[in-house]
Image: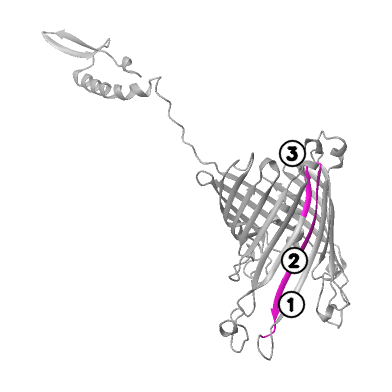
Amino acid sequence: MDSSQCPARRYVIRNGKVNDSLTRTSMPSRPVRSIALAVVVLLCPVLAPAQNPSSPPPQPVVTPQFDFSGIIFGSYGLRTDSAARATLGGASPNQFAIDRAYLNFRMPAGDNAQVRITPDIFQNLNAATGAYYQGWVLRLKYGYLQYSGFRNKLGAGSGVTGRVGILQTAVIDYLESFWPRYLGQVAIERYGYFSSADAGVAGLVTLPHRIGEVYATVTNGPGYQSFDRDRFKDVGLRASITPLANVTGAGPILRTFAITPWGYKGWIASIFAAGGPGQNGPGVNGAITWGLPRDRWGIFTGVKERRLVAGAEYSQRMDENDTGGNTALDPRIVHDSTGRVASGFVIGRPVEWFHSTPQSPVSFVARYDYYTPNVHPTSVNYAGTTPSYSYWLVGLSYDATQRVTFTLDWQVQAPHDFPPPVGTNVVPVPRQSTLFAHWVASF
């Protein structure tokens, strides 16, 4: 309503008296007319601007976007190796399991900032805590504040992101963008090189023109599954380069080719870090105050396209630990160990190699690892031998929907070059063989 729509007043002369009233066909009583007149006079100046076409419309309230997503995967496993069957009188152990459930919560925290919280639901099989609860429990996998800036400052598509909290370590999360986690851990996590997440700070530099990224971390070291054990911190660095990303003649698969060198420099405390009576260390009460090396490095190459995903990796780890009593009669002894792993995998959709449309729901998967825990074992028990393991996986997958996949796969881990058992109480290292039916759903 604008001011022109307010009812006009008129003056009426009756019985020699002048009365003012609103123009109406029938005249209400004097009290009612007075109240109505007061209300209209008060409301007209207020309502007029609200309905004036020239006034700007009210701005909508902007609510920050809340992003929720997740992934859940599980399996049915049937052990087929003789060692497992021997524990049940020749019958095969088997079980249904929910292997993991990740729930991702992301929320803006002002301009250029974001918070991510990812709980990890898993089955508690830890011997130390299993007596408390042996079912599925909830823990924090990721929980960090992220701030992004310097967009396009280094070139088109470039940027810098900083993170603080429980965050991704140097390379495992990146490798899982190639290898499907629901079938098993990537090689360096499977063989205990380091954890996939840890508490600390990190920086991600996205290089311009899709040519790659650089990621660096400083973390506690033990991983998100453990408390911080000592004062030392671990440093990780990864550089992922896609040299063919802008070469149009290379084809869609080769344009995804990536080469990723990475390194991880860490330390752990000596078992004599606190010292004690009679110890020989240089610190107070004979404490050994410096850290023992915990170093890893590796290189990964891979391609990632719907029709073909493939990767190959070589990694090495170097560790030190000490034993003895750190006394004159029982000196401290430092042990070196160097291990290595080579891993390769391929996931393909053969139907789409020859006919790109329609998309095929069927794919195959294969993987092989060769893991050597210590390339130069010093224990007398391993004299003349270098124990190692081979691990392989073969399977066939079917996409029930765009977000649900079922896979039937066979996984085997076999020991090599272990010394023959000596004595009646020594059990040989067994071969493990399991037939799996895996499933995964993202949402």
Q: Residues within 10 Å of mark 3 (few under 14, many from 20)?
A: few
Which type of secondary structure does the marked residue at label 2 adopt? strand
Q: Residues within 10 Å of mark 1 (few under 14, many from 20)?
A: few
Which numbered disc, 3 or 2, marks the residue that appears first in the sequence? Answer: 3
Image location (x, y in percent) of residue 167: 61, 56
- Report the quarter where the C terminus lies: top right
Q: What whole-number distance in Å separates the C-alpha atoms at marks 2 and 1?
A: 14 Å
Q: Is residue 418 left or right of residue 108?
A: right
- Please report the residue visible at 69 percent of the width from the left and 68 percent of the height from the top: 294
- Report the quarter where the N terminus lies: top left
Residue 163 on the magenta span = no
Q: Is residue 262 left or right of residue 15?
A: right
| Residue at the farthest left position | 16
Which type of secondary structure does the marked residue at label 1 adopt? strand
Image location (x, y in percent) of residue 427: 84, 76
Location of mark 1 (residue): 335
Residue 322 on the magenta span = yes
Compared with residue 189, is residue 360 higher up or lower down, i.e. above or below?
above
Location of mark 2 (residue): 317
Q: Magenta segment range? A: 300-325
Q: Quadrant of residue 234?
A: bottom right
Q: What whole-number distance in Å separates the C-alpha atoms at marks 3 and 1?
A: 48 Å
Identity of the amino acid at label 3?
Asn
Identity of the amino acid at label 1?
His
Q: Residues within 10 Å of mark 2 (few under 14, many from 20)?
A: many
Location of mark 3 (residue): 246
